[in-house]
Image (tube, helix red, strand yellow):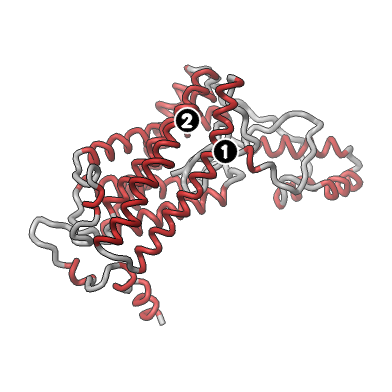
Amino acid sequence: MTSSISDWLWSERFWFPENVTWADLESPPPGVEYPRLRHLHSAVPLAFALFILRVLFERLVAKPCARLLQIQEGVPRRVQRNDVLERVHNSKTCPDTKQLEGLSKQLDWDVRKIQRWFRVRRNQDRPSLQKKFCESMWRLTFYLGVFMYGMRHLWASSWMWDVRQCWHNYPFQSVSSEQYNYYVAELAFYSSLMFSQFIDVKRKDFMIMLVHHLATILLITFSYTNNMIRAGTMVMCLHDASDIFLEAAKLANYAKYQRLCDGLFVLFSMSFFLARLVLYPFWVVYTVLFDSWEIIGPYRAWWLLNGLLLVLQALHIIWFYLIARIAIKAIFKGKVSKDDRSDIESSSDEEIYSNGSKNATQTLKTKDGGHTGNLNGDTHEH
């Protein structure tokens, strides 16, 4: 049974066009290296190295910058110890009206007091503004560095200026050291983010971001194994470009430079539109969908890849609609609006928590992922 599953998973008819086999890629010409799955094994130790580097960066670079900008760590307000409410909180952080009334009778507490207890208890587990500043500064540094590296490689490549060359002699295309380094760096980064989720303060979008990171890792691995590296590097570079402005806007927001935050968010909106609604569909998706059909013809992995790219494009449209709403408010009202799913909840005692989720059209969460993001929250995307 194990053998049949392996044969199905590594079926040549799934991975490659007709008349191409794994054996054809095993013996490349002298001086030529074809991508193989085992090449990505180095991403595992590199992911742990990036996590250690992140910890050092946040302590030695980001935290002093935060203090310089007077972003304090802040000690969260502690709740009165109550075993009954703690057990309820562990199973459901936002009890509904019926549960609140039951707890009120059980504890002989006013409903509003119980609401306040749960609100403070949730905030008690949330990361401080300084911690979020440090995390965003780390992501900004990585995105900026990897984007410059990827762009430097793509600028000198012939297929960036003639995308049809992504499919010439496919899949017998040699992988360069620059392509390999770019792929391993991206794969290690998202692997480290996935691992660190289990160590960091648990966020309310934990499961969503876990799925996002897993999907990103699978897509990077899939495109490398299938030797769609030329198109893959362009996809990664386009997504990194807008993430730079998003993280910069977050830093300005945490530092309370509102005008700078508004300006950077507008730049993020413009870069998002250009990269993901213009270049991505009319440059990358077009060549993967139409040029590859003409040059190499469709096969099973081809259908899967194009399906994923089109789903991602649909998400881009939805995300841009949400981003544009906030950008328009920033332009006409002079301030980026607060995301309803921000980490910092309102301190108003009049807030009533219900079972229903908050209005999704007022949020900026990313899930493809990647990344759009929310300026006051924790999410990011790729």
Per the image, label 2 sits on a secondary structure element best described as: helix
- Classify 257 as above or below 197: above
Residue at x 38% of width, y 80% of height: 4
Q: Residue furthest bottom?
A: 1
Q: Position of residue 146 (x, y in %)?
A: 32, 38
Q: Quadrant of the C terminus?
A: top left
Crowd around label 2: few <14 · some 14–19 · many ≥20 (10 Å) = many
Q: Nearer the viewer, residue 77 or 252?
A: 252
Where, by quadrant of the figure, is residue 168 drawn?
bottom left
Amino acid carrying mark 1 in the image: Leu
Q: Is residue 195 visible?
A: no
Q: Which of these two is toward me, 154 or 160?
A: 160
Q: Position of residue 289 (x, y in %)?
A: 35, 57
Q: CA distance from mark 1 to mark 2?
A: 26 Å
Would you place residue 331 above or below residue 8 in this image? above
Please state the total of marks drawn on the protein image. Answer: 2
Residue occupying the point 13% across, 63% down: 28
List the residue tagged with mark 2: 134
Badge 1 or badge 2: first in the primary sequence: 2
User: Which residue is more in the foreground, 70 or 345?
Assistant: 345
Secondary structure type for disc 1: helix
CB contact under 8 Å: marks 1 and 2: no
Relative horizontal placement of residue 351, taking residue 37 as reference (left or right): right
Q: Residue at x 69, y 42 (%)?
A: 358
Q: Is residue 204 above or below residue 67?
A: below
- Report if residue 246 is visible in the image: yes
Query: Where does label 1 land, which residue?
Result: 322
Amino acid carrying label 2: it is: Cys
x 86%, y 47%: residue: 103
